[in-house]
Structures are given as C-alpha cells and as structure tokens.
Image (cartoon, helix red, strand yellow):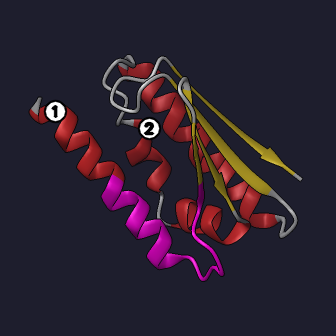
C-alpha cells in the first residue's frame, strides 16, 4: 500500500512541477474514463516535461512494468515531449490504460 501512495504522490508532485514550470493559459487536460486516463499537454507543458527530464521519472511509476519497460517509457516520454515542444501547433497525448495505480499499458503520441 505504501508503494501505491508513493507512486501517486510522485505523480502529483510531477504534475505540479510541470504546471509550475510551463507558462500556460490552461492546465493540462485530464480525461478519465472507466478503462483509461488520457492526459493532453500543450507545447509549453511538453517543454516543461522535456526540459525538466521528468519523462524518466514518470517512466518509473508503473509498478506492473518491467525495469526495461519503465526505461523505455521514460525515454519515449522525454523524446516525444521534446518533439511536441518544438512545434507550437502540436499536442502531446498520453493514454494510460487500466487503473493509474497499476496500468496495463501506456501510449504516448504527438499530434501536429
């Protein structure tokens, strides 16, 4: 139980760091459904994720992922955050399948 609370606390702290570092006119959009959670980031929010190298930290959160999957997710988050930050007309989308405390999959993409 402590592990789950730590992961949620780290996720909340990271979200606050992204929000504080990004000069945005709105907060990141969070869409929660019964099967997944979608996070939509502006280029400024993606820039904060990229510059702060927060992708590597976020990649370590899913407790059900292997160490290799966590590392891969962190690299993907950081790389795509940099890509989204470079294009002011882009949107970074993160889809977390399953419960946030034990996701079954995480998909990351950039729409231009």
Question: x%, y% of residue 38?
Answer: 61, 41
Camera-side mark, 2 or 1: 1
- Of the 4 image quadrants, the one containing the N terminus is top left
- The part of the image, by quadrant, that contains residue 68 is top left
x, y (%) of residue 87? 84, 65
Residue 85, quarter of the rendered image: bottom right
Residue drawn at (68%, 57%) of the image? 82
Residue 90 x, y percent position in the rendering: 83, 59
In the image, taking residue 16 as reference, residue 96 lies left or right, namely right
Is disc 1 placed on a helix, strand or loop? helix
Image point 56% across, 29% down: which residue? Answer: 36
Q: Does the magenta stretch include residue 22?
A: yes
Would you name the residue on which mark 1 appears? 3
- Count of marks overlaid on the render: 2
Magenta stretch containing residue 40, yes or no?
Answer: no
**Quick one: which residue is furthest to the front in this view?**
34
In the rendered image, the vertical position of residue 54 relative to residue 86, given as above or below: above
Residue of label 2: 59
Q: Is mark 2 on a helix, strand or loop?
A: helix
Above or below, 43 relative to 39: below
| First to last magenta residue range | 12-29
- The crowding category of the residue bearing disc 1, from other C-alpha atoms within 10 Å (few below 14, some 14 to 19, many at least 20), is few
User: Which residue sits at x=63%, y=79%?
Assistant: 24
Question: Which sits in the foreground, 22 or 67?
Answer: 22
Q: Is residue 66 above or below residue 84?
A: above
Q: Is residue 6 left or right of residue 63?
A: left
Residue in the image at 42% along x and 60% along y? 15
């Amino acid at each position: 139980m402590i592990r789950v609370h730590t992961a949620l606390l780290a996720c909340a702290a990271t979200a606050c760091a992204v929000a504080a570092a990004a000069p945005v006119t709105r907060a990141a959009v969070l869409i929660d459904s019964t099967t997944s959670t979608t996070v939509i980031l502006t280029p400024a929010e993606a820039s904060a994720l990229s510059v702060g190298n927060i992708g590597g930290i976020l990649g370590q959160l899913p407790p059900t992922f292997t160490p290799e999957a966590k590392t891969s997710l962190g690299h993907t988050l950081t790389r795509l955050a940099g890509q989204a930050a470079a294009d002011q007309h882009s949107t970074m989308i993160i889809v977390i399948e399953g419960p946030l405390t034990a996701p079954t999959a995480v998909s990351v993409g950039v729409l231009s």
